[in-house]
Amino acid sequence: MGVVAVTPLGELIIAKTRQVPDFPTPGVTFKDLTPLFADAAGLAAVTDGLAEAAHGADLVAGLDARGFLLAAAVATRLDLGVLAVRKGGKLPPPVHRESYRLEYGTAALEIPAEGITLLGRRVVIVDDVLATGGTVAAARRLLERCGATVQAAAVVLELAALDGRRAISPVPVHSLCLA
């Protein structure tokens, strides 16, 4: 599928994205945003774009692992706190856990069950790439089960052909670039 970069920010994202063919499996082209994040102007532009989608939130939730970088930058820009939504097994107990299916098996996301109050908080989920939507959907279920309202998901790059928006619906998705 071709790339749709209709804005200067979208063009910057595409220009700074490294394409890695046949990773993690043959036939898949991995979109590596590391060069974009390593570029000061690129990181600032992406942070500004994602921050626009997070206005009105009380908390920014970043998904393990690249989403941590972005969520922290957005939270700092908006003077909000950040919550790291971790892969299963990375946090000490007690945790809230949400398991979900992947194309090749299952995975889990976790957040601390103590020390953070989510009840009634408006949260925006931030990640780098939206593909099938399974991870963002699992994060949404986890946060909502803990009493938060997920007001939006914000991503740098959306792989539109994989229709990840459907898995997250009805939560709005804000993408800085479609590919």
Image (cartoon, rainbow, N blue to C red):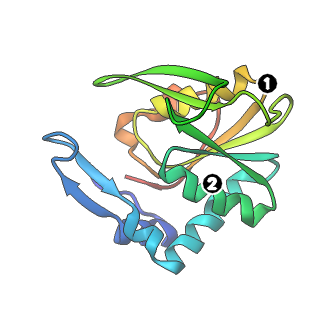
In front here: 85 or 121?
A: 85
Residue 173 placement (x, y as % from top left): 59, 42
Looking at the image, is 166 positioned above or below residue 179? above
Identify the residue at image location x=42%, y=63%: 5
State which quadrant residue 142 falls in: top right
Q: Amino acid at mark 1?
A: Gly
Q: Is residue 103 visible?
A: yes
Q: Pick out the residue farthest to the front.
A: 92
State which quadrant residue 63 falls in: top right
Q: Is residue 36 left or right of residue 70?
A: left
Identify the residue at image location x=28%, y=24%: 104
Q: Residues within 10 Å of mark 1 (few under 14, many from 20)?
A: some
Identify the residue at image location x=52%, y=79%: 40
First in residue order: circle 2 vs circle 1: 2
Looking at the image, is 140 positioned above or below residue 68? above
Residue 112 placement (x, y as % from top left): 68, 32
Residue 48 placement (x, y as % from top left): 65, 67
Q: What residue is disc 1 on?
A: 147
Q: Secondary structure at mark 2?
A: helix
Q: Amino acid at mark 2?
A: Ala
Q: CA distance from mark 2 to mark 1?
A: 20 Å
Q: Pick out the residue farthest to the right.
A: 120
Identify the residue at image location x=50%, y=19%: 99
Label for residue 46?
A: none
Residue 82 placement (x, y as % from top left): 71, 50
Q: Is residue 85 left or right of residue 134?
A: right
Q: What residue is disc 2 on?
A: 71
Q: Is residue 64 left or right of residue 169?
A: left
Q: Residues within 10 Å of mark 2 (few under 14, many from 20)?
A: many
Q: Is residue 156 visible?
A: no
Q: Secondary structure at mark 1?
A: loop
